[in-house]
Image (cartoon, grey):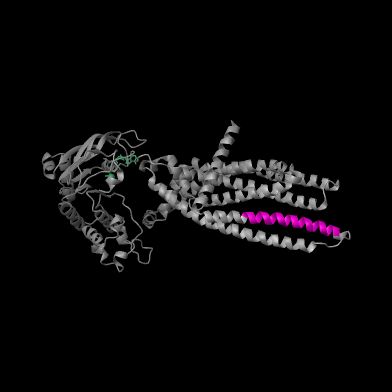
Amino acid sequence: MIRSLVRHNLRRSLSLVLRMITLSWSVRPWAVSGYFLGAILEITSFLTSIYATAKLGSLLAKYVTGAGTGSIWWWLWLDVIAAIGIGVAFWIMSWNKRLLYFQLVQWSTLQFHAALNRLDIPEFYEEDIRNMINKAQSGYSWQLANFSENTLELSYAILRFVATAAVVAQIAWWIIPIIALFLVPTLITESKLAKVQWFVWDDEGDDRHVLWKLSYLMSQVKNQMELRSSQTRQYVLDKIRVMNRTFYRKQEGKFNTVNRWLLPTKVLEVAGTATGSIILLRQFLQGVISLDRYFFLSGALLRIGSALNNIFGTLSRMQENLLFAENFFTIVDKQPQLIDKPHAPVLDIKGPPRIEFKNVSFTYPGQENPVFTNLSLVIEPGQHLAIVGENGAGKSTLIKLLLRFYTPDSGHILIDGQDLQDIAIESWYTHLATLFQQFNEYPFSIAENIEIARPAYNNDKQRMHQAAGFSNVDHFVRNYKHGWDTVLDNSFEKGVEPSGGQWQRVALARAFYRDANVLILDEPTAAIDARAEYDIFNNIFEQYQQRTAIIVSHRFSTVRKADHIVVIEHGAIVEQGSHRSLMKEKGIYYDLFSKQAEGYKE
Ligand SMILES: Nc1ncnc2c1ncn2[C@@H]1O[C@H](COP(=O)(O)OP(=O)(O)OP(=O)(O)O)[C@@H](O)[C@H]1O
Ligand SMILES: [Mg+2]
């Protein structure tokens, strides 16, 4: 059982190391070649150096006993040249190693974020994936690059060992297994050390996640305002302190348990080299080997000890890298599940399509109660549909389903008769412009914040101005010194801090810029002032005549202008129709509308 575990671990580690080498090669082949050229130079120089030193030693011994100096100066100069060779070799190696490091940092940073872009939306809520993301996030910018450095160092240590061993083995091959044997306990202990510490991450995954979220929250000025004024600063800080303490105490505990075994193994390491030295000296004294052989071998013996030590040391340092790399590659290799079926047809529509929810039932993964049971709804092409309902009724969920972020448990969502599950999803997104309740605030200029919506338009300024006009963004951009180039982040020189409603108007402009057949807006004007809201909705209802608009809103002044209104309650459509017909019905809509209207009266 233990043996199979070791074999399994070994195979996994080996495949990770191989992957790292191929990866390093593919991102910067010249740096890898340069490194190995340096390594070969170093190994040759260092073998030359111990050979020259041995020769020098034995010639000196002869000189003492009265023999001539012979070629003694020649060997000294060779030793000096070898030393220069070693210096130059290390310079070449570290230079190339650094170049590769920079390249890999870029690679892993990009791959990590690309992987986040590929993950299925529901996966972000899964505990083990979330833990993996957090772990990867803790070191994507350096840990993989470190791993690659360690892999290079390992290869070099092995090469160096093999070269020295080949020389030594010709005279005394038995020295090598003796030294290796004494190093094994160190390796085992150190690998265990890395593992126990790493797995604390899994035990404390939830806390790490909370910590990470709190840390992000604390770094944002908008959150700092609440933290200060509501006097929660200390509370949050204490939470961080306690969570960190738990985490590191646990790590410290695990570390201490394993670490005490490290001292005896370190003593054992010396035993191998010492045994070899004793045997060598005896052989010399017995006249089995000559003086220059003795010098050469004892020099090589010390080096072979350090070479082996290097191999084992690098291996144990790599343990943490290995665990990181395994986690990192799992995230990077993750293939999304909610993808297009093979040969999924492209949605072929010219104008706004007919959208139909047909008996759709849906439950969030891991939840017991369904949000929708047999929900049916038709949205005609060009219709302006408003969705109203209490918090938690399922309005945003309806939109998420329409975007195929989730798969219904049963039922179908049809776009012009084609099942949403069957089509190539990007071809659907092309026709959509969406604005979510929690929209994105990009740290870009206003123009870029809008034009990002459709890069294919190539920063079309005319369209941008039109979209900005639609959402009343132009009203406040006029006052900015840097106009459209103003960065929406106060910490930049050209930056400003937009108000909440201004941000929302920019996000709306982004949706308009897409110029899509179907406009989906979830609470688009919650932060926008009454006059701007009035203008914006007039724009939508007048200018978007030929296009579909799906608008979730709690404001009935807006909703009443829609062609069709749907009232959702507890995941079911309880009423639908025009404002006029719903008012006549005197049901829920009438009730909600009247309550809100009453609030405005004196
Ligand atoms: N990712 C999720 N995982 C599990 N449950 C969820 C998830 N997102 C939403 N829910 C639940 O689904 C139900 C419907 O939520 P939804 O966000 O659709 O409501 P809503 O009508 O948009 O409400 P609001 O007016 O507050 O925006 C709620 O009970 C909510 O708790
Ligand atoms: Mg919502």
- Ligand 2 shows up in which quadrant of the image? top left
List the single residue furthest toward the top.
Answer: 1
Measuring from the top left, give residue 484's x and y in whole percent.
29, 64
Q: Magenta stretch?
A: 39-62
Residue located at (31% from left, 68% from top): 482
Find residue 502 and report its image quarter: bottom left
Measuring from the top left, give residue 87's x and y in whole percent.
65, 60
Find residue 123 and report its image quarter: top left
For the N terminus, the image quarter is top right
Measuring from the top left, give residue 510's x and y in whole percent.
27, 55
| Left or right of 30 on screen, residue 282 | right
Q: Relative to the observer, which residue lies in front, 155 or 259?
A: 155
Measuring from the top left, give residue 395's x and y in whole percent.
26, 42
Q: Would you say residue 4 is visible in this rendering?
A: yes
- Judged by its main secondary structure, the magenta piece is helix
Residue located at (70% from left, 45% from top): 269
Q: Is residue 61 magenta?
A: yes
| Left or right of 5 on screen, residue 526 | left
| Left or right of 183 on screen, residue 547 | left
List the single residue furthest toward the right.
Answer: 66
Q: Relative to the observer, which residue lies in front, 161 or 409?
A: 161
Residue located at (18% from left, 55% from top): 539
Q: Relative to the observer, which residue lies in front, 478 or 51?
A: 51
Q: Relative to the observer, which residue lies in front, 432 or 597?
A: 432
Q: Is residue 1 above or below residue 17?
A: above
What is the number of callouts on the image?
0
Q: Would you say residue 232 is visible in this rendering?
A: no
Q: Is residue 262 magenta?
A: no
Q: Is residue 501 above or below residue 195?
A: below
